[in-house]
């Protein structure tokens, strides 16, 4: 396998599903807290770790994006395997669990044995992992994302949405609000525009700090991102990124001022896009940013 990662356990894909643990997948497993204690696993702040141990909540997340039967699901930051268990019990044909913390691998290897070919463990940094090299290739992402790399991962996946039918992701609530923000909101920005250009974003539910071990200081939110068949409006990606970064880089300025860093004639550019030069970045819709990108020469 290329890159700085390795597959720990990988067996052929088995075409069978267990819905809501009807096959008793969880019955033969020890309690997750016992697994954590036995392996001496403690969440590391440096890795953005907060473990989910509540079975009802992990199952709710696993099925939030729809039925998993027939799906190959990639999970990032599997930790000791709480959500991993739920994904398998909820009927995913195969789960690819990506985990860089080697302290968790022994616990996950035990789960892989129990899963009988339905779980592949990949010891890797998710930021450098090439999803196109995975086999079977993932069709869904379901993950309690490490807080410290969540937006970086999201921007990475926006480059390879052809792989995914959907992404069910947990973010800090503040980040989730930025993703779903609409024009006119203070939280509307570069993240909002780039995600909504390529995906529909739906808020599913909040998760309180007390649901995690250890409890973070912030509430989390689960979003479902559905890749669009086509971008919301036509635009070259590099030009769209350029105008969005310039506009929000000085968001308090009117567009005729903030766009001076990418063009000597910002008012001519705005006129070509049929936009009022006195508007500020947060007033523009995704489609208007696309029009601005198309007018950029």
Image (tube, helix red, strand yellow):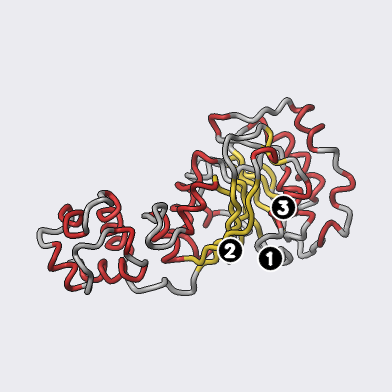
Q: What element carries label 3?
A: loop
Which is more foreground, mark 1 or mark 3? 1
Residue at the limit of the structure toward the top, as seen here = 40
Q: In the rendered image, which residue does mark 1 sit on?
A: 66
Q: Does 254 sit above or below residue 35? A: below
* Alpha carbon distance from label 1 to label 3: 25 Å
Picture quarter containing residue 145?
A: top right
Tell me residue 134's x, y (percent): 58, 54
Tell me residue 113's x, y (percent): 79, 44
Q: Which residue is drawn at 73% across and 59% down?
A: 92
Q: Residues within 10 Å of mark 1 (few under 14, many from 20)?
A: few
Q: In the rendered image, which residue does mark 2 sit on?
A: 166
Q: How crowded is mark 2: few (under 14 residues within 10 Å), some or many (20 or more)?
A: many
Of callouts 1 and 3, the N-terminal one: 3
Residue at the limit of the structure toward the left, as seen here = 264
Locate the C terminus by quadrant: bottom left
Q: Which of 203 and 152 is in front in this view?
A: 203
* Dot 2 and dot 1 residues touching (CB under 8 Å): yes
Q: What element carries label 1?
A: loop
* Dot 1 and dot 3 residues touching (CB under 8 Å): no
Q: Which of 87 and 214 is in front in this view?
A: 214
Q: Residue 11 carries which label?
A: 3
Tell me residue 35's x, y (percent): 79, 33
Q: Residue at x 58, y 35 (%)?
A: 217
Q: Does 235 sit above or below residue 281? A: below
Q: What element carries label 2?
A: strand
Q: Which of 141 and 11 is in front in this view?
A: 141
* Alpha carbon distance from label 3 to label 2: 24 Å
Q: Residue at x 49, y 71 (%)?
A: 228
């Amino acid at each position: 396998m290329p890159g700085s990662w390795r597959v720990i356990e990988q067996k052929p894909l088995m075409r069978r599903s267990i819905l809501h643990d009807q096959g008793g997948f969880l019955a033969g497993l020890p309690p997750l807290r016992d697994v954590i204690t036995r392996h001496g696993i403690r969440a590391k702040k440096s890795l953005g770790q907060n473990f989910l141990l509540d079975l009802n909540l992990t199952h709710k997340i696993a099925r939030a994006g729809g039925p998993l039967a027939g799906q190959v699901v990639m999970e990032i930051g599997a930790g000791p395997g709480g959500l991993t268990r739920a994904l398998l019990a909820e009927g995913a044909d195969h789960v690819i669990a990506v985990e860089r913390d080697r302290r968790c691998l022994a616990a996950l290897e035990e789960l892989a044995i129990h899963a009988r070919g339905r779980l592949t463990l990949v010891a890797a940094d998710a930021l450098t992992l090439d999803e196109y090299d995975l086999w079977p290739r993932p069709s869904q992402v379901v993950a309690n994302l490490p807080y410290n790399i969540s937006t970086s991962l999201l921007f990475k996946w926006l480059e390879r949405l052809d792989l995914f039918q959907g992404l069910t992701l947990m973010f800090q609530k503040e980040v989730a609000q930025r993703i779903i923000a609409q024009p006119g909101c203070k939280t509307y920005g570069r993240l909002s525009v780039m995600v909504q250009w390529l995906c529909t974003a739906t808020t599913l539910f909040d998760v309180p700090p007390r649901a995690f071990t250890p409890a973070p200081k912030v509430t989390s939110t689960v979003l479902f991102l559905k890749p669009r068949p086509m971008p919301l409006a036509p635009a070259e990606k590099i030009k769209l990124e350029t105008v969005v970064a310039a506009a929000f880089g000085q968001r308090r300025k009117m567009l005729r001022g903030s766009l001076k860093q990418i063009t000597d004639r910002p008012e001519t550019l705005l006129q070509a896009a049929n936009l009022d030069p006195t508007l500020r970045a947060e007033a523009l819709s995704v489609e208007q940013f696309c029009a601005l990108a198309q007018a950029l020469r």
